[in-house]
Image (cartoon, coloured by chain):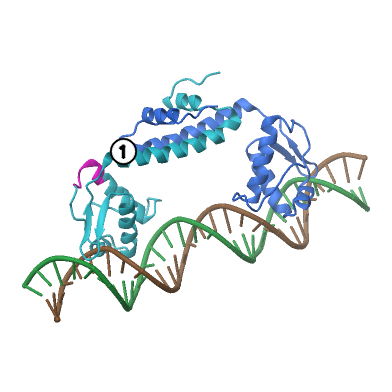
Chain colours: A cyan, B blue, C brown, D green
DNA sequence: TATACTGTGTATATCTTATATGTACACTAG
DNA sequence: CTAGTGTACATATAAGATATACACAGTATA
């Protein structure tokens, strides 16, 4: 398979796996219903523990990317991108709200942040 | 002093201290040059270790809120709010950039985020 | 039903980071 | 000198993240 796991990458192994699979799914390289390698296969190929692959697959399933059935294997889910997008947006909204709250002490408003992120001038 | 440390608050003790002092400074309750209680005093009053207060003061100094001089004590700094604001903005810019990068997989743009945050009525 | 695949549950090991601490030492003013 | 101040060092503890082995259970099919 296409997965590469690098010791130079500071991300944990399970995350290197999920990230690469997510990208493959998002880009269409992996299409819905495609069977993923079994956790044993993948573990052998990457020379890491089966359990670490299981962890990666479990994460992917929780996030809606794949479906796993005991005794059968794991398969790319027929992803509802709109739903996933909404969930991600909710998550982001939450993070931004926290940032805004922390920024309030410095008299930094939402508009200030939007402006600076756009890369345009900051007001005086 | 005005500091209250609560075991119910999930934040660590040193953070409860820094947060309350930051707020007092930001609101003007603590003015520049004001002498803070010595770490021993504060520790005694709050019934926690001197070292934890030292940690809190050290953080405050690193962030530019106070100045500490060995043998003398700690004093509220003559804060350059514009500078602090800029630093905070840079920090935020960095965080938002990370969020945007992660969001790209879901075809979520900066504008999408700005819109959804505005929609939630986040305004000061 | 035997078998050769598949995933699962439980228990643990290791490592890192965060948090909190005591004690002995050093600086400063009067 | 002394009585206050902060500092450095060495730990201790707890919590969380990461990775693992091995025995167990589900599934398809010859």
Q: Count every numbered label the image shows and give the total.
A: 1
Residue B40 in the figure: left or right of residue D30: right
Quadrant of the snapshot with the C terminus of chain A: top right
Mark 1, residue position:
B106
Residue B63 in the figure: left or right of residue A111: right
Find residue C28 and report its horizontal and vertical position in percent: 82, 41
* Residue ID at (30%, 53%): A61
Chain for numbered disc 1: B
Find residue D23 and report its horizontal and vertical position in percent: 32, 78
Find residue C13 and report its horizontal and vertical position in percent: 45, 71
Tell me the crowding category of disc 1: few under 14, some 14 to 19, or many 20 or more residues within 10 angstroms, Cα based.
Answer: some
Secondary structure of the residue carrying numbered label 1: helix
Find residue A90 and report its horizontal and vertical position in percent: 40, 39
* Residue ID at (73%, 32%): B29
Residue A18 in the figure: left or right of residue B87: left
Which residues make up the magenta segment?
A: A24-31
* Residue ID at (24%, 45%): A79
Q: Give the image quarter of residue A92.
A: top left
Quadrant of the snapshot with the N terminus of chain A: bottom left
Front residue of D8/B44: it is B44
Q: Give the image quarter of residue B28.
A: top right
């Amino acid at each position: 398979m296409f997965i590469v796991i690098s010791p130079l990458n500071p991300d944990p192994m399970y995350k290197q796996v999920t990230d690469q699979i997510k990208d493959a799914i998002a880009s269409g390289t992996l299409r819905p219903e495609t069977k993923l390698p079994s956790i044993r296969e993948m573990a052998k190929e990457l020379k890491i523990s089966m359990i670490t692959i299981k962890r990666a697959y479990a994460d992917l399933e929780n996030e809606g990317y794949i479906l796993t059935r005991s005794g059968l294997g794991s398969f790319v889910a027929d992803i509802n991108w709109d739903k996933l997008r909404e969930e991600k947006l909710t998550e982001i909204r939450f993070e931004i709200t926290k940032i805004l709250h922390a920024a309030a002490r410095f008299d930094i408003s939402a508009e200030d942040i939007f402006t600076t992120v756009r890369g345009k001038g900051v007001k005086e």
